[in-house]
């Protein structure tokens, strides 16, 4: 799309992350599914927060993390997500605007508080996420600025939002409007458990609306209910224009019809915390895509951003990622 105001507009759950180190015994004691994201209620959120060790609070949310990477690389990005008019909502709003993301979704007045994700990081760097959605559950079609959608090169949708009926409708409306305006539609599957809940709907969405699909290996296997990555690859190439599939230490695979790019993972990276790795990959990839780089370069940018994020605690980059990217583009 020529003369677009934004490279990407992202829609997602606006969440403040609380990260703390934990061991497998603590996860087992509290029946937490290791490496997965589980939705929790207010009472559970308060109980788990009470048993967490010393932690750090940082603005997060999957699509918010992706938007942060795009902005950090110099891209023009807008974000749509619901917070409450409370302290954590102010923290989220300040943080995302401070990194150069356009964000003006009206906050929720009264009622549910801003969402938070309690993230338990085990010694193997796996993250176990317990998410209280709070105000994000109130996101609806009225919160989507369609002017942003129609003036973007790419619309990026967060799969986690599919749990909420009104947010689901907002995403569908945005995808239709984006396609009408000539923008590309991208979707991240977010989580294998999320895929299991909405497998048929995600496949339908991929077939009818999605141009660029992001997924990790467990998510794409879950989507097509197969055991082999190569089998999933054959399925996904029929459903969307581009699929960018991450495989942890095996790097990633980007497929576009008969065109397949295998991208090696970055070498010499000490894995500290995998929180936000897929989000960062999507951010690097979409920045490259909207700047007109070839798919192999987009995949390398994604891998480089993921490598930076997993080298420290927290879901967003700490290094000068624009400088890092200069080694590739």
Image (tube, rainbow, N blue to C red):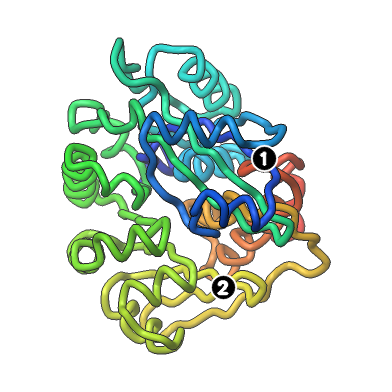
Question: Where 289 sits versus 13, above or below?
Answer: below
| Location of residue 185 in the rendering, given as x and y in whole percent from the top left corner | 31, 54
- Foreground of the two, 287 or 312: 312
Question: Where 124 sits versus 108, above or below?
Answer: below
Q: Which mark is residue 268?
A: none
Q: Quadrant of residue 58?
A: top right
Q: Who's the residue at 16% across and 42% down the image?
A: 169
| Location of residue 214 in the rendering, given as x and y in whole percent from the top left corner | 43, 62
Confirm whether residue 90 shows in the render: yes
| Location of residue 287 in the rendering, given as x and y in whole percent from the top left corner | 53, 50
Circle 1 SS class:
strand
Q: Which mark is residue 247?
A: 2
Circle 2 SS class:
loop
Confirm whether residue 325 shows in the render: no
Find out whether the residues at labels 1 and 2 contact each other: C-beta distance under 8 Å: no
Q: Who's the residue at 55% across and 52% down the image?
A: 128
Rounded to the nearest angstrom, the CA distance separating label 1 from label 2 is 25 Å
- Foreground of the two, 307 or 179: 307
- On screen, residue 271 versus residue 200, left or right, reads right
Q: Who's the residue at 51% across and 55% down the image?
A: 282
Count numbered badges in the picture: 2
Residue pointed to by mark 1: 20
- Foreground of the two, 250 or 144: 250
| Location of residue 161 in the rendering, given as x and y in whole percent from the top left corner | 31, 44
Quadrant location of the C terminus in the rendered image: bottom right
């Amino acid at each position: 799309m020529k003369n677009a105001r934004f490279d990407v507009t992202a829609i997602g759950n606006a969440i403040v992350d609380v990260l703390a180190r934990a061991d497998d015994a603590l996860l087992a004691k509290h029946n937490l599914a290791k490496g997965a994201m589980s939705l929790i209620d207010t009472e559970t959120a308060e109980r788990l927060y009470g048993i967490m060790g010393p932690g750090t609070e940082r603005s997060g949310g999957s699509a918010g993390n992706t938007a942060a990477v795009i902005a950090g690389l110099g891209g023009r990005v807008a974000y749509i997500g619901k917070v409450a008019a409370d302290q954590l909502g102010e923290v989220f709003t300040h943080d995302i605007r401070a990194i150069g993301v356009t964000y003006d979704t009206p906050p929720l007045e009264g009622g549910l508080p801003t969402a938070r994700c309690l993230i338990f990081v085990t010694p193997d760097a796996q993250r176990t996420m317990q998410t209280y959605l709070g105000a994000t559950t109130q996101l609806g079609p009225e919160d989507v600025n369609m002017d942003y959608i129609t003036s973007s090169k790419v619309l990026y949708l967060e799969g986690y939002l599919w749990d909420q009926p009104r947010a689901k409708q907002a995403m569908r409306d945005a995808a239709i409007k984006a396609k009408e305006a000539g923008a590309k539609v991208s979707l991240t599957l977010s989580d294998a458990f999320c895929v299991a809940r909405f497998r048929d709907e995600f496949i339908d969405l991929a077939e009818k609306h999605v141009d660029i699909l992001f997924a990790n290996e467990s998510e794409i296997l879950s989507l097509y209910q197969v055991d082999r990555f190569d089998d999933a690859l054959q399925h996904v190439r029929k459903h969307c224009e581009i699929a960018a599939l991450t495989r942890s230490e095996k790097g990633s695979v980007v497929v576009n019809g008969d065109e397949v790019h295998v991208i090696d993972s970055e070498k010499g990276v000490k894995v500290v915390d995998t929180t936000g790795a897929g989000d960062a990959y999507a951010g690097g990839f979409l920045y490259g895509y909207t700047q007109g780089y070839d798919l192999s370069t987009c995949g390398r940018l994604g891998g480089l951003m993921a490598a930076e994020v997993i080298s420290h605690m927290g879901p967003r980059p700490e290094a000068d990622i624009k400088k890092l990217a200069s080694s590739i583009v």
